[in-house]
Image (spheres, grey):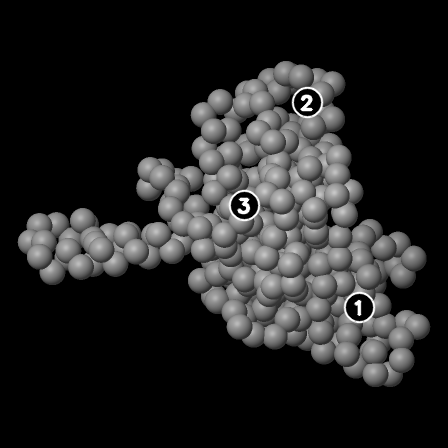
């Protein structure tokens, strides 16, 4: 993998990649298809995201290519353990592909659904079974998944990027069960222009949409945090938020202040309590009272004892800096 990561794929490398079979898409959405490819020199599996250009006018083709280019431009500048690596953009037989490593365990949403079925029938996570996927179900730790996603989101926000479509379906799992955020078609720089992806401007993402965005507002760091809270619900329960409600009733319930009910703590114990506190802090209706992503990471790691809203945290930080001029002891007192 290291050889491939250091060598950014381009059109000139097309002969090194197996050609995806046009009729064997393994996923996708409104404006793209996903194919499984192989990097011939190493045999490494590749995820190849192809823009749908057929049945489009010349103008539509140009627009789609520009959108893919914007996504590639954003994605290519991101490097973090919890962000899916970008290998390059390729043209094969007049088709445009965005190339990334293949994640064998797929997206977190489907993994959680399958794991829930496994737990339902097997019950005991200590049950010995040599099936790799069943071993993965036993090894999976909810707190590690939440921590990894929070770390990836904090990194994006540090880069001044609003992700825009955070949900378990857009998080992939490595063989080590490390979560990696993917699909940057809806990401934008703060106060910048939206890009469009195969998700068609987030169609189908209303369960993770914050009240202010439902009401016509722009996507922000705070709306990302709200969506993160809903991902925590997915991780803890194995279900999408409020699964019994369809779109109209769901949106009406959220706008009235309803949130997912607390699930039984079961085998998670104290971990469940900490993670539920995070979810509850993330989905408050007032965006200014939601915590920042880096603060969520600190809370999970135990660096801070309570969750503060981003605005309150800045206020406390300012107070500490004010005292710093009078304080003659250790500078650690002023650390955030």
Q: Are marks 3 and 2 in contact (CB under 8 Å)?
A: no
The one nearer the camera, 158 or 2, is 158
**Lower sequence index among marks 3 and 1:** 1
- Determine which residue is flagged by label 1: 51
User: Is residue 61 at all visible to an observer of this figure?
Assistant: yes
Task: Say which residue appears at 65% left-offset and 63% top-offset.
Answer: 216
Residue lying at the far left of the rendered structure: 328
The mark found on residue 283 in the picture is 3
**Lower sequence index among marks 2 and 1:** 1
Q: Are marks 3 and 1 in contact (CB under 8 Å)?
A: no
- Determine which residue is flagged by label 2: 119
SS label for mark 2: helix
The one nearer the camera, 106 or 143, is 143
- The percent coordinates of residue 129 (x first, y second) are 68, 21
Tell me the CA gap for discs 3 and 2.
28 Å
Tell me the CA gap for discs 2 and 1.
38 Å
Task: Say which residue appears at 51% left-offset and 34% top-offset.
Answer: 276
Q: Quadrant of the N terminus?
A: bottom right
Residue lying at the far front of the rendered structure: 256
Q: Is residue 285 above or below residue 318?
A: above
- Tell me the mark number nearer the camera, choosing from 3 and 2: 3
Q: Is residue 300 above or below residue 118?
A: below
The one nearer the camera, 312 or 164, is 312
Tell me the CA gap for discs 3 and 1.
34 Å
The one nearer the camera, 149 or 129, is 149
Q: Is residue 132 above or below residue 213?
A: above
- The percent coordinates of residue 288 (x first, y second) are 45, 55
């Amino acid at each position: 993998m290291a050889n491939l990561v250091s060598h950014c794929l381009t059109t000139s490398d097309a002969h090194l990649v197996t050609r995806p079979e046009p009729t064997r898409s393994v996923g996708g959405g409104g404006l793209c298809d996903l194919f499984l490819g192989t990097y011939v020199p190493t045999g490494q599996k590749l995820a190849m995201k192809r823009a749908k250009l057929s049945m489009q006018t010349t103008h539509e083709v140009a627009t789609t290519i520009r959108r893919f280019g914007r996504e590639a431009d954003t994605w290519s500048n991101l490097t973090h353990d919890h962000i899916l690596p970008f290998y390059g953009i390729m043209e094969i037989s007049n088709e445009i592909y965005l190339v990334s490593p293949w994640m064998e365990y797929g997206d977190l949403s489907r993994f959680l659904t399958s794991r829930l079925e496994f737990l339902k029938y097997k019950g005991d996570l200590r049950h010995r079974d040599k099936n790799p996927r069943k071993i993965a179900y036993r090894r999976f730790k909810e707190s590690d998944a939440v921590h990894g996603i929070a770390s990836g989101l904090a990194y994006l926000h540090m880069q001044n990027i609003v992700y825009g479509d955070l949900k378990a379906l857009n998080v992939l799992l490595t063989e080590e069960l490390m979560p990696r955020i993917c699909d940057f078609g809806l990401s934008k720089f703060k106060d910048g222009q939206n890009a469009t992806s195969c998700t068609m401007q987030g169609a189908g993402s209303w369960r993770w949409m914050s009240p202010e965005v439902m009401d016509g507002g722009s996507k922000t760091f705070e709306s990302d945090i709200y969506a993160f809270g809903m991902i925590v619900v997915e991780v803890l329960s194995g279900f999408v938020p409020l699964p019994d409600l369809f779109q109209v009733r769901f949106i009406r319930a959220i706008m009235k202040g309803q949130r997912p009910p607390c699930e039984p703590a079961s085998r998670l114990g104290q971990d469940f309590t900490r993670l539920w506190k995070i979810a509850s802090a993330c989905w408050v209706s007032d965006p200014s009272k939601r915590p920042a992503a880096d603060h969520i990471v600190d809370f999970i790691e135990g660096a801070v004892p309570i969750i503060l809203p981003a605005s309150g945290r800045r206020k406390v930080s300012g107070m500490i800096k004010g005292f710093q001029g009078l304080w003659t002891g250790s500078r650690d007192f002023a650390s955030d």
